[in-house]
DNA sequence: GCCTAAAGTTAGGACGTACTAACTTATTTC
DNA sequence: GAAATAAGTTAGTACGTCCTAACTTTAGGC
C-alpha cells in the first residue's frame, strides 16, 4: 500500500459525512449486521449508480470502515459496524421521539429522521430517548440499538410465512413507504395487533386475515413486510 | 448576461444547501435585515477566507438571493431576505425547544441548533414552536421571526450605553459564546433581570451594576453584549 | 469448459465549496 | 494627488460525491 493511502487510513476520528453514514447504514441493513453487501444492492438501496458505489466503498475501506475485495462486495469492519449502529440508533430514537413527543404519524417519521440523524448530537439523541422513556423500538417496531452498540437481532417470520390457521402478534413493519404504512394503518395492522391467517389463495394469491372482529385480505407482497411473533392459538381472545 | 448565467438564475426552488443558508443568515445579521455586508465581514463571521466569500456571493447573486456589485459588498434581495429569516426562525425555534422541552442549558443550545436548522423541515419547526407555546424569543432573548417572515426589529441599548444611575431589564444577550453565557448565568444576568448601573470607571473601565440585592462589576466588552430595555427608576423594587 | 449475461470496475467529467497566492481596486494619509 | 494600506478579486487547485460510457471480471447454462 502507498504511503498516501496509508496516511489516509490513519486519519483519526473526524465526524463522518452524511453520505458515509448512509452507506454504512445501508450496508449494515443489507448484511444484517455482519454479512456481506453487493455493490448493486448498495446502489439500489441508496438510489445511486453502481459506479458511484465502487468509488465510495474504496474510500470507506481506506478509512478502515469496510473490508472490500474487488468484485466481491464489502463487509463492515468492527469500526464500521459501530458507526452504522450509532446512525441506526439516532434514526430510530428520532423516529420514536417525533411520534411520541411531537405528534407525528408513523408514516411521516422516516423522512424527517433521515435528515436529522446526520445533524443530531449523541447528547440530543440521548435526551430524546430519556424524555420518552428509553424506547426499545421505533414506531414501526424496529429495535433501537443501545448506546453501547448492541441491538436485538431477533428474526421474525413475516405474515406471508405464517401457516394457515396460525396466529401472531405484529411486531414490526419492515418498510418505510408512507403509502404502505398508511394503508396498513387503515387496516389497523399495527405493532401489537394480534392476527390470524384464515386462508391463503394459491399462486401467490391474497392472504385472508382475522384481526380482532375484522377480517381482511392482503397481497403477499404486503404481507411479506409485516413481521409477526408467533403465538399459540387460543379461543376467546380479546382484540 | 450570458445565456448560461441566465439559465442558472432561473433555476427554481430547490432547497438551499447548508452553506448557502449560513451565508444568508450571516449577511442578514450583519446588515440588520436590509443593510449591506462587506466581503471581509462575511468571511470573518463564517470563519472563511475572503476569497471563498467572493466566489460564493457571486453564485448567490446568480441565484437571485443577493444584489452584488464587485468591490462594494452585497445586500439581500427580497427572496434572500425571506430565506434568511426562514433559517433564523428555524434556528431560534430549535434553540427555544431544546431549552424548554429537552432541558438544555442556554449556553449549549446554539451549537446544536446550528446543525439542526439545516435538517429540520418547516413542519417540524412549527410543531416544536406549537409544543412550547409559540415562543417569541429564543433562550438568549433574540426575537423569533414569524412564519410569514416578519420579525421584531426593536433595537435595544446595551448595558455599556446605559447612563450611570439608569435601570434596565435585560432583554437579550447578543453573543453565543458558551463561556460568556455561563459567566453571565453565574452572575444571574439573564433575560428578564432588572439591573441598575451604579458607576462606570473611566478609560473603558469596569461597570458596576446592582441587580436585586447583589452588586457586581463587569468589563465594557461584556456589557456591550447585554441588551436592555430602559425602565424608569423607582425605589423599593423587588428583585 | 466455453460463452453470454450480470455484476462490477475504471476513466473522465461535473458541481459545490473550500483553500493559497498573486493581482487589482478602493481608501486613507500626508 | 501620490503613495501606502486595506479590501476585494481572480487564477489555479483540492476534496467529496456524484454521473455516464466503456471496459473487465465473475457466474450460470449448456
Image (tube, coloured by chain):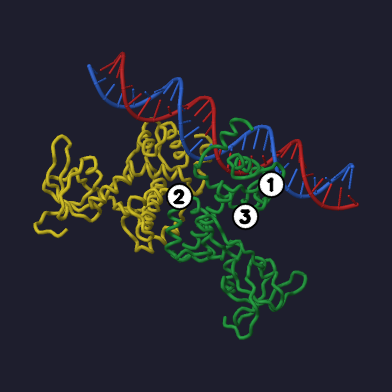
Chain colours: A green, B yellow, C blue, D red
Q: Are marks 2 and 1 on the same chain?
A: no
Is residue B70 positioned above or below B229 on the image? above
N-terminal of the pair, mark 3 or mark 1, is 3
Where disc 2 sits, the SS reads loop
Where disc 3 sits, the SS reads loop
Q: Is residue A236 left or right of residue B27?
A: right
- Per the model, the C-alpha gap separating discs 3 and 1 is 15 Å
The residue under label 1 is: A73
Q: Is residue B123 left or right of residue B232?
A: right
Closer to the camera, A132 or B100? A132
Task: Kindly identify which chain the residue marked by label 2 belongs to.
Answer: B
Count of numbered labels shown in the rendering: 3
- Per the model, the C-alpha gap separating discs 3 and 2 is 30 Å
- Per the model, the C-alpha gap separating discs 2 and 1 is 34 Å
Mark 3 vs mark 1: give the one in front: 3
Q: Are marks 3 and 2 on the same chain?
A: no
Task: Kindly identify which chain the residue marked by label 1 belongs to.
Answer: A
At a point 67% along the width and 72% down the height, the residue shown is: A218
Image spot of residue A48 (x, y percent): 63, 48
At a point 77% along the width and 70% down the height, the residue shown is: A203
- In the drawing, what numbered circle is on residue A33? 3
Q: Is residue A181 left or right of residue A165?
A: left
Image spot of residue A12 (x, y percent): 51, 39
Is residue B169 positioned above or below B52 on the image? below
Amino acid at each position: 500500500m502507498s504511503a498516501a493511502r496509508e496516511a489516509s487510513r490513519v486519519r483519526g476520528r473526524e465526524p463522518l459525512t452524511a453520505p458515509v453514514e448512509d452507506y454504512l447504514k445501508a450496508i449494515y441493513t443489507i448484511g444484517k449486521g455482519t454479512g456481506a453487501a453487493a455493490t448493486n444492492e448498495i446502489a439500489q438501496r441508496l438510489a445511486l449508480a453502481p459506479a458511484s458505489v465502487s468509488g465510495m466503498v474504496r474510500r470507506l475501506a481506506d478509512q478502515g470502515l469496510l473490508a472490500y475485495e474487488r468484485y466481491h462486495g464489502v463487509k463492515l469492519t468492527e469500526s464500521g459496524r459501530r458507526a452504522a449502529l450509532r446512525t441506526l440508533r439516532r434514526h430510530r430514537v428520532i423516529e420514536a421521539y417525533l411520534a411520541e413527543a411531537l405528534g407525528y404519524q408513523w408514516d411521516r417519521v422516516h423522512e424527517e429522521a433521515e435528515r436529522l440523524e446526520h445533524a443530531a448530537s449523541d447528547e440530543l439523541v440521548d435526551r430524546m430517548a430519556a424524555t420518552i422513556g428509553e424506547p426499545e423500538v421505533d414506531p414501526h417496531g424496529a429495535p433501537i440499538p443501545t448506546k453501547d452498540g448492541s441491538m436485538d437481532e431477533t428474526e421474525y417470520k413475516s405474515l406471508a410465512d405464517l401457516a394457515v390457521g396460525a396466529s401472531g402478534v405484529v411486531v414490526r413493519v419492515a418498510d418505510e413507504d408512507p403509502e404502505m404504512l398508511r394503508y396498513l394503518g387503515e387496516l389497523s395492522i399495527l405493532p401489537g395487533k394480534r392476527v390470524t391467517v384464515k386462508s391463503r389463495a394459491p399462486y401467490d394469491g391474497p392472504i385472508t386475515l382475522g384481526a380482532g372482529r375484522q377480517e381482511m385480505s392482503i397481497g403477499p407482497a404486503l404481507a411479506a413486510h409485516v413481521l409477526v411473533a408467533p403465538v399459540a392459538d387460543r379461543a376467546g381472545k380479546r382484540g
